[in-house]
Image (spheres, coloured by chain):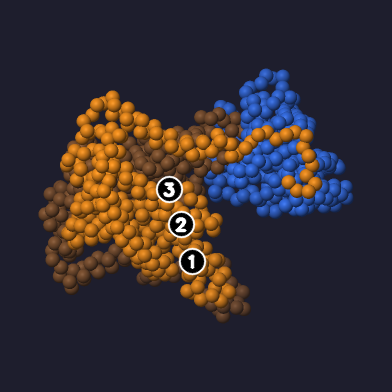
């Protein structure tokens, strides 16, 4: 309502916010939600155009359509789902062990100041010798087997998780443990009520980081060792010169990671750190 | 103690912060875990009596490393060269594009989701495609390094720029500063913590990507070397190589980036290095 | 009731508590500068049951250190600090502490924060619910039981902290500038509420503040400390009875205003000295 309409007309003074005008635009409001997909659609278009114009050799680049049909074929043969399952299983196992061992250990070390200070350099060192660098040694020990891949994932995941759990405990403000002690809490109680929940945001960061590293280690492991999995799919496709499968596999990888993040990691964070107002930027 | 401070009747207890005990604690304590690891290693080796191809003694690893040091040097050089190239390009492109994205909402809205997606597949998964494009060798490795670092740096820079508080910008603009000056004197320094964080993580990922790429697609470099030794059952050289990889990774972080961080953002009180 | 070592005492010590500080001196090494800091020097203080003692002094004069010693977080370098005649060895539910910064747990709701002390002491749920409900009402937070601290304002968070401390029913309450981070309006209300609360429950209180007016308003006695090293410079009894004090009364009463002036003078002296010394 413009000023000229309302001025001097007491009887027409509005008693609430202006009513929403429904037009055809608002009726298909849900289309706006798809706006988020624009960059990807655009990227797809650019890809297709590039391919059309440039007409590269099929061992360099293929069209989106070919990638699509390659993926469809893989799904039909049941290969894609099998490989995805394999990779995810390996990852899940790594996560379980990495978190199951890394978090409690990190807590333990973090609770003791001297121990934490002493352990930090060693942990940092082994963290920077990435799992991938140990791959040749693991192959010598376990051969080109499942165990090698598992070992790599667990190793790679362990350190970020442990480290962040440690840091999480150390960064809990002293005030909180002091306050809880004035309520009569003993050491164990303080650990349970203060340090464990307090370290949660950091632990989540560690898990995120760990899964990121672990995922890459998994793929590298599958490249080298083989035995199924997305990494194997991508690597194998290269030796056969099937660019469509390579790109297809990579896209599936990206989507899986995003799905993992959206469907699992974020909800966990939502239920804990966001609810407690401890969101880290 | 200033003028007029009264004398105390009780003498202070001896609380010398520079006492030998404290210093020893600070410097020696971190070394202890390394010693423990070494001791355990040696113990396991001694008791287990493993073949050389499975678990060599620490001594053997050291000897072999010294023995083949020239070779190592060559490979280290090759790897570092690739790293420098790949990371520098990633840093420059990442920072520039990240700045652009941070400053312009349009660019951010368009590139942001794409880069996030690309970041999810970055680095290692690109190796087969990179081999198809560049063949085996240095070009491919440099590309992988760039790939592993670029997206991360981009995202961090973009975030850092977007997070510079509005009032800092407006403050300078209201003093009559030009947009360019504001970018130079407010936005870039203000985004520094994130830029540094991005560079630091980027370097880490780049280094890992380098090793992985050399593992499968190069004929020189540390990654190639340790993988080659696997065929000869030379566990001692593999371990030596892995430890060198770890040391270089740590050294780069400690000796280059951490001091850089200290002289910029820590000095400005924006963050503390761990 | 529990004794000062956190254990359970017999029924005989049902009387309100006293605090005795005798020739207390304390030094510590500053983590930042590595220098030895002389925090407290020959402090003598006696607080009677039911007394509300407020402590003022320039920054760095050691008042927080003194509170930390009374709370049991620090052991003094020299001298004694006793509660009910027994030395203080560790924190416990007999001495409630309210801090200036956020000390309620961010991952617990208002209800669970207030009931935390009772949980620890294994009070059965029904009794817990009752007491928490009573306290929630007392501090005016009805309806917020299931909120998380980050959803509350500064004043409300402090109310939770106070309620939590009160839940364990300690005889002694130690407060370190609890209202410093609260806005001025809420502060006045909280002060009057605190006054009412401590009188009704006969608590012995040790209260640190930067505000001289607050110190005079709340206290039976104001202790002024010197600049570092902290010493008791003077103890100023506050005229009148706490029971009749409201902010309205404060602004009109000559005696009270005079007391404020006196304490202000003491503090200003110290702050001035501190500046010259540096």
Q: Position of residue B272 (x, y in %)?
A: 51, 51
Residue positioned 68% across, 37% down in the render: C27
- Chain ID at mark 3: A
* In the displayed structure image, the side of residue A227 where residue A94 appears, left or right: right
| Above or below C33: residue C82 | above
Residue at image mark 3: A270
Q: Which residue is mark 2?
A: B260
Name the residue at the left extreme. Answer: A240
Marked residue chain, label 2:
B
Q: Secondary structure at mark 2?
A: helix
How many residues crowd around disc 3 within 10 Å: few (fewer than 14), some, or many (20 or more)? few
| Residue A254 can be seen in this image | no
Chain with colour blue in the figure: C
Of circles 1 and 3, the one toward us is 1
Q: Nearer the viewer, mark 2 or mark 1?
A: 2
Assign a secondary structure to mark 1: helix
- For marks 2 and 3, give the CA distance: 35 Å
């Amino acid at each position: 309502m413009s000023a000229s309409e309302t001025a001097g007309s007491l009887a027409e003074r509005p008693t609430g916010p202006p009513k929403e005008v429904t037009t055809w635009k608002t009726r298909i409001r849900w289309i706006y939600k798809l706006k988020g997909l624009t960059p990807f659609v655009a990227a797809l278009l650019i890809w297709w155009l590039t391919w059309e114009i440039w007409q590269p050799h099929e061992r360099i680049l293929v069209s989106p359509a070919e990638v699509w049909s390659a993926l469809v074929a893989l799904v039909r043969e049941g290969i894609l789902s099998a490989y995805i399952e394999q990779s995810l299983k390996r990852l899940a196992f790594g996560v379980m062990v990495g978190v199951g061992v890394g978090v409690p250990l990190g807590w333990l070390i973090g609770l003791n100041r001297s121990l934490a200070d002493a352990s930090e350099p060693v942990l940092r060192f082994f963290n920077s010798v990435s799992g991938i660098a140990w791959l040749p040694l693991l192959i010598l020990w376990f051969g080109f087997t499942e165990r090698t891949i598992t070992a790599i994932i667990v190793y790679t995941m362990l350190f970020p998780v442990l480290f962040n759990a440690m840091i999480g405990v150390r960064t809990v403000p002293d005030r909180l443990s002091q306050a809880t002690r004035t309520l009569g809490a003993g050491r164990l109680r303080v650990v349970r009520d203060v340090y464990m929940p307090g370290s949660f945001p950091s632990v989540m960061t560690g898990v995120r980081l760990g899964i990121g590293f672990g995922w890459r280690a998994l793929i590298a492991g599958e490249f080298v060792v083989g035995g199924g999995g997305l990494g194997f799919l991508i690597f194998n496709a290269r030796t056969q010169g099937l660019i469509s499968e390579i790109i297809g596999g990579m896209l599936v990888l990206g989507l899986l990671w995003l799905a993992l993040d959206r469907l699992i990691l974020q909800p966990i964070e939502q239920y804990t750190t966001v609810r407690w107002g401890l969101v880290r930027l | 103690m200033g003028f007029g401070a009264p004398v105390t009747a009780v003498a202070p207890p001896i609380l010398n912060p520079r006492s030998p005990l404290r210093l020893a604690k600070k410097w020696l304590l971190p070394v202890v875990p390394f010693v423990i690891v070494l001791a355990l290693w040696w113990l396991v080796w001694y008791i287990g009596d493993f073949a050389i191809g499975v678990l060599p003694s620490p001594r053997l690893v050291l000897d072999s490393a010294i023995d083949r040091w020239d070779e190592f040097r060559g490979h280290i050089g090759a790897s570092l060269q690739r790293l420098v190239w790949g990371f520098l390009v990633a840093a420059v492109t990442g920072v520039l594009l990240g700045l652009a994205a941070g400053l312009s909402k349009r660019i951010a809205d368009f590139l942001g989701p794409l880069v996030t997606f690309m970041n999810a597949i970055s680095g290692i998964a690109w190796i087969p495609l990179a081999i198809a494009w560049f063949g085996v060798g240095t070009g491919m490795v440099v590309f992988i390094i760039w790939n592993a670092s670029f997206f991360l740096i981009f995202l961090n820079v973009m975030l850092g720029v977007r997070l510079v508080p509005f009032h800092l910008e407006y403050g300078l603009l209201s003093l009559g500063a030009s947009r360019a000056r504001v970018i130079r004197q407010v936005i870039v320094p203000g985004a520094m913590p994130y830029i540094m964080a991005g560079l630091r993580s980027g370097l880490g990922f780049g280094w890992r990507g380098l090793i992985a790429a050399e593992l499968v697609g190069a004929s020189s470099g540390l990654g190639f070397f340790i993988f080659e030794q696997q065929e000869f059952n030379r566990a001692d050289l593999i371990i030596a190589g892995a430890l060198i990889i770890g040391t270089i990774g740590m050294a780069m972080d400690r000796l280059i980036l951490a001091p850089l961080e200290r002289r910029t953002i820590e000095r400005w009180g924006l963050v503390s290095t761990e | 009731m529990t004794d000062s070592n956190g254990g359970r005492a017999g029924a005989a010590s049902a009387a309100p508590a006293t605090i005795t500080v005798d020739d207390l001196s304390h030094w510590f090494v500053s983590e930042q500068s590595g220098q030895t800091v002389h925090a407290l020097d020959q402090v003598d203080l006696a607080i009677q049951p039911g007394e509300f003692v407020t402590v003022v002094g320039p920054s760095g004069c050691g008042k927080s250190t003194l509170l930390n010693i009374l709370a049991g977080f620090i052991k003094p370098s020299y001298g004694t600090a006793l509660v009910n005649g027994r030395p203080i060895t560790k924190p416990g539910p007999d001495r409630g502490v309210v801090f200036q910064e956020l000390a309620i747990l961010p991952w617990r709701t208002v209800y669970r924060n207030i009931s935390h002390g009772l949980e620890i002491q294994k009070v059965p749920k029904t009794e817990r619910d009752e007491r928490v409900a009573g306290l929630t009402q007392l501090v005016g937070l009805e309806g917020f039981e299931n909120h998380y601290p980050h959803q509350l304002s500064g004043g409300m968070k402090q109310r939770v902290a106070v309620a939590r401390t009160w839940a364990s029913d300690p005889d002694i309450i130690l407060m370190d500038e609890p209202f410093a981070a609260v806005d001025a309006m809420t502060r006045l209300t909280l002060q009057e509420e605190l006054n009412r609360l401590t009188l009704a429950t006969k608590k012995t209180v040790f209260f640190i503040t930067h505000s001289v007016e607050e110190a005079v308003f709340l206290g039976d006695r104001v202790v002024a400390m010197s600049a570092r090293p902290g010493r008791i410079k003077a103890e100023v009894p506050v005229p009148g009875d706490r029971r009749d004090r409201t902010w309205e009364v404060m602004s009109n009463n000559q005696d009270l205003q005079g007391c404020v002036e006196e304490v202000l003078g003491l503090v200003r002296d110290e702050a001035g000295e501190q500046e010259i010394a540096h």
